């Protein structure tokens, strides 16, 4: 069978949130973009709890805000945690200070089949040539750069596409990332396994927190409880890899066993039934998902989303990191194709920002695990931060050592940059000071949320949201030393005006 050949500006591999984001933002600058997705959408994916920067920042840049509203996803004001020593759950809210809580201080809990489909259809509507059931089999490269890909369509017909750039947004399990030289480095700290399923009729937290994700620690790990609709709940246990043997037998029994050992979730599910049919009827497991690639770019090719890195399900960072990377990659490619910035400089900015975002979340999540203090349990003992490398320890010292200052400016997601800079609200106020927080671990948690690294975590997410809300009026200083700044429309880079 002869191979069909064509030439375009960019080929994007994978139609998840990372691939849809980058391809749409490239097409909006008029480039010829082909997106190849091996599945027929809608397809199942895990990663249902989102952060506001994806919904309001990226969502607006992509032009899907109204469609997301129409989809009537569960509104998530924040997270509720049974974490630390106190048995009563406490809340982390996206609206940090009441006077600043704006229209963007919430996110959604989404059925990924629906959310990813909205993003992919939007990409097609914005001019991306979306080809489903098209599996990329090979990357075409020479010593100098990546030149394109080969793929097979749904009829088994082989194709070849030559392109100025190939974006690998093919997720966790594809091997295309190996074409960017370097290796996938697995985390020594987050060595977990997840087992998850779906339930009908589970209890909800009391209003107004009924849409929150609930994360509840138990001896062998922790459980997520995500309300996807009034009745449907995603429930998953994250346990240590050392307990993998417990997942060998009947998976239903394994999941039930973990739920039974987690009092609050057991209670919430006492009147619920597990979904046993259709897409949500399967109990699934995932492992080996915490890693980072040693390089995210080589000439002609870039990694975005899970193809590049992922940390851990706690705190819902996966879709944020993949859509953020999609935005950064689009800015870099748009700049290079326009001849404005050299490829080296554009991707130095891409990789610098992306790694920064990954690193601060990594530190934050490590410290967050450390807040759960059950020294008697293997899982939690193994996740004390003292197991980390020296650099991580340093980060942790900054994290827990930083004394919360009411003057450290931090605002909620919807606040604009000026308010962000002026505000005297502390991020620590995001943790609701309920009775459950008036304990030693509550105080530690409160301090954790007031530390510099947490501020760093939120800075760039806020910038993205402000960009979504304000468009061309958004102001951003360089994030990296001598770095680039986004163009007025947010779709490419420029040198900072002197
Ligand atoms: P994906 O969503 O994986 O999309 C990649 C696409 O590429 C797929 O559609 C795939 O079919 C396609 N593809 C693969 N190979 C090829 C090929 N050769 N050719 C063409 N197409 C190809 N994140 C959150 O934000 N919130 C959460 O609550 C959350 N919970 C999680 C729980 C667990 C247990 C795990 C493991 C992860 C969780 N995540 C969560 C992370 C989240 O699932 C991912 O970070 C996110 O889906 C990454 O998006 P992506 O676009 O990079 O990749």
Image (cartoon, grey):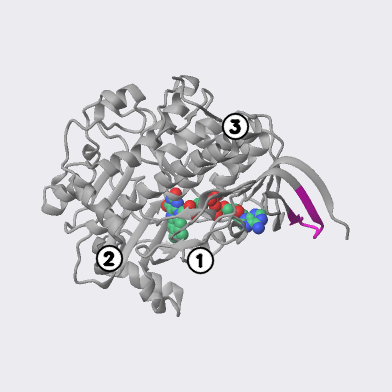
Q: Earlier in the sequence, mark 2 or mark 1?
A: 1
176 inside magenta stretch: no
Select label 2 or label 1 by which is in front.
Answer: 2
3 or 2: tag closer to the N-terminus: 3
Residue 381 % position (x, y): 24, 68
Q: Residue at x 67, y 34 (%)?
A: 125
* 122 left or right of 148 in image: left
Q: Quadrant of residue 310?
A: bottom left
Q: Nearer the viewer, residue 314 or 337?
A: 337
Q: Nearer the viewer, residue 166 or 480?
A: 480
- Asked whether the viewer can see residue 327, the reply is no
Q: Which circle marks residue 276 in the picture?
A: 1
* Drawn side of residue 169 relative to residue 289, left or right: right
Circle 2 residue: 387
Give the residue displayed 52% in from the left and 25% down from the top: 487
Foreground mark, 3 or 1, reads 3
Residue 335 tag number: 3
Residue 158 among those drawn in magenta = yes
What are the residue bounds of the magenta stretch? Answer: 150-161
Residue at figure coordinates x 43%, y 75% from the top left: 247
């Amino acid at each position: 069978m002869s191979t069909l050949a064509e030439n375009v500006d960019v080929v994007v591999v994978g139609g998840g949130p990372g691939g849809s984001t980058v391809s749409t933002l490239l097409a909006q600058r008029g480039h010829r973009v082909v997106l190849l997705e091996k599945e027929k959408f809608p397809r199942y994916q895990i990663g249902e709890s989102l952060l506001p920067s994806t919904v309001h920042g990226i969502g607006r840049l992509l032009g899907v805000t109204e469609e997301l509203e129409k989809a009537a996803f569960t509104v998530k004001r924040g997270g509720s945690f049974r974490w630390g020593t106190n048995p009563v759950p406490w809340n982390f809210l996206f609206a940090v200070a009441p006077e600043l809580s704006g229209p963007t201080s919430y996110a959604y809990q989404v059925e990924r089949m629906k959310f990813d489909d909205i993003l992919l259809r939007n990409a097609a509507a914005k001019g991306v040539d979306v080809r489903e059931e098209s599996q990329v089999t090979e990357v075409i490269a020479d010593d100098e750069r990546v030149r394109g890909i080969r793929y097979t369509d749904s009829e088994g017909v082989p194709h070849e596409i030559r392109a100025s750039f190939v974006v690998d947004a093919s997720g966790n399990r594809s091997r295309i990332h190996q074409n960017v030289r370097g290796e996938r480095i697995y985390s020594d700290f987050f060595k977990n396994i997840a087992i998850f399923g779906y339930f009908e009729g589970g209890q909800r937290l009391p209003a107004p927190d009924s849409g929150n994700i609930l994360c509840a620690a138990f001896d062998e790990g922790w459980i997520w409880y995500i309300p996807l609709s009034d009745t449907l709940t995603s429930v998953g246990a994250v346990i240590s890899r050392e307990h993998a043997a417990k997942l060998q037998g009947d998976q239903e029994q394994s999941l039930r066993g973990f739920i039974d050992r987690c009092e609050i979730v057991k209670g919430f599910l006492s009147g619920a039934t597990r979904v046993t049919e259709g897409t949500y009827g399967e109990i699934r497991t995932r492992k080996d998902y915490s890693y980072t690639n040693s390089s995210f770019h080589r000439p002609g090719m870039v990694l975005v989303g899970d193809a590049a890195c992922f940390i851990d399900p706690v705190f819902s960072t996966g879709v944020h990191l993949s859509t953020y990377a999609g935005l950064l990659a689009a800015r870099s490619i748009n700049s290079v194709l326009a001849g404005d910035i050299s490829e080296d400089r554009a991707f130095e900015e891409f990789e610098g920002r992306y790694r920064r975002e990954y690193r601060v979340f990594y530190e934050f999540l490590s410290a967050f695990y450390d807040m759960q203090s059950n020294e008697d349990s293997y899982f939690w003992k193994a996740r004390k931060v003292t197991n980390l490398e020296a650099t991580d320890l340093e980060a942790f010292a900054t994290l827990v050592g930083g004394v919360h200052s009411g003057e450290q400016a931090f605002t909620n997601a919807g606040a604009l940059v000026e308010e962000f800079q002026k505000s005297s609200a502390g991020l620590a106020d995001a943790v609701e000071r309920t009775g459950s927080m008036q304990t030693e671990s509550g105080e530690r948690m409160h301090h954790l949320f007031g530390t510099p690294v947490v501020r760093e975590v939120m800075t760039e997410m806020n910038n993205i949201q402000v960009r979504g809300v304000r468009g061309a009026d958004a102001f951003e200083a360089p994030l990296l030393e001598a770095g680039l700044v986004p163009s007025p429309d947010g779709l490419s880079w420029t040198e900072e005006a002197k």
